[in-house]
Image (cartoon, rainbow, N blue to C red):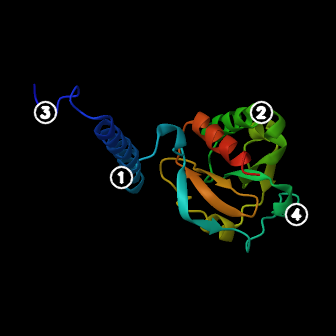
Amino acid sequence: MNATSPERLSPRSRGRWTLIALFGLFFGAMALAGVLRFSGWQPTAHRNSGQLLQPPADLRALPPTLANGQPYAWNPEARTWRILVAPSAGCTSACVTLSQGLGKVWQLFGHNADNVEILWLGTPPAEVLGVPALRVLRDQPDLRAALPAVDDPAGTPVYVIDPNGFVIMRYAPGFDMAGLRKDLATLLKLK
C-alpha cells in the first residue's frame, strides 16, 4: 500500500485536506464570479431588451407642451414612467400598429398601469387617439433633437423616460413589445 492512501491518512491529515478543498471551492467560485463580472457577461434574465443610454438624455430643461397648449410637468414625486413615441411625419399604418402594441403593453401592467403614460410627439393618426394613457405632445423641434437617433431610417424608435425626465432607454424600430414590457416591469419595481 502507498503511504498516502486514504486508509493511511491520520484524522488530522484528512481534516487538513478537507479544509484545503473547502477553501479551493470557495475561492474558486469567487474567482469565477469575478471573471464573469468583469468580462461583461450577464445572465439572460438580467439583460435589457432596449438600448440603455449612457449617459441618459436630460429632458428636464425642455418641458413638453400638450397638444391643447397646457404644459406637461415631469412631476418626479408621482413616480410616473413614460413611453415616448416620436414618429416622423407621414407615419400612418406602422404608427397605428405601434400604438396598438403599446396600448396592450400598458394594459398588461394591471394595477401598475397608473404609473405609466404613453407620450406621442406630434400629431398621431386618428386611430391612435383611442389608446389609454396617451398624452399627445406638440411636436417641438428642440425636444425631438434631444432624443438619441430619433430620425432612424428603419422606422419609429420608442423611448423610456424615468420620472425625473431622463431618457434612459431606446428601442429600435421593429422591437419586441414583450421586451419593453419586461424592462418597464423591472423599472416599476424601483419605487
Q: Which numbered disc, 2 or 1, marks the residue that appears first in the sequence?
A: 1
First in sequence, mark 1 or 3: give its number: 3
**Kind of residue at badge 3:** Ala
SS at mark 4 in the image: loop
Q: Identify the mark at residue 35; answer none if there is no mark.
A: 1
- Which x, y percent locates residue 29? 39, 44
Which label's residue is closer to the chain start, 2 or 3? Answer: 3
The structure residue drawn at horizontal position 82% and vertical position 43%, both measured from the top left corner, is 133
Q: What secondary structure is found at the residue carrying circle 3?
A: loop
Residue at 83%, 59% (x, y): give it: 66
User: Is disc 4 in contact with disc 1, using a CB cutoff of under 8 Å?
Assistant: no
Q: CA distance from mark 4 to mark 2?
A: 27 Å
Q: Is residue 48 visible?
A: yes
Q: CA distance from mark 2 to mark 1?
A: 41 Å
Do the residues bearing badges 2 and 3 touch, measured as CB atoms within 8 Å?
no
Question: Which amino acid type is marked by label 4?
Answer: Gly
**Nearest to N terminus: mark 3 or mark 4:** 3
Q: Could you tell me the amino acid type at mark 1?
A: Val
Q: Which mark is residue 107?
A: 2
Residue at mark 4: 69
Q: Taking 185 as reference, is 148 left or right?
A: left
Please tell me whether mark 1 sits on a helix, a strand or a loop. Answer: helix
Circles 3 and 4, Cβ within 8 Å, touching? The answer is: no
Q: Is residue 7 above or below residue 106?
A: above
According to the image, label 3 marks what residue?
3
Query: Which element type, helix, strand or loop, lies under badge 2?
Result: helix
Determine the CA span between mark 3 and mark 4: 91 Å
Q: Residues within 10 Å of mark 1 (few under 14, many from 20)?
A: few
State the separation of the CA atoms marked 4 and 1: 54 Å
Q: Which of the two discs, 2 and 1, sits closer to the camera?
A: 1
- The image quarter containing residue 189 is top right
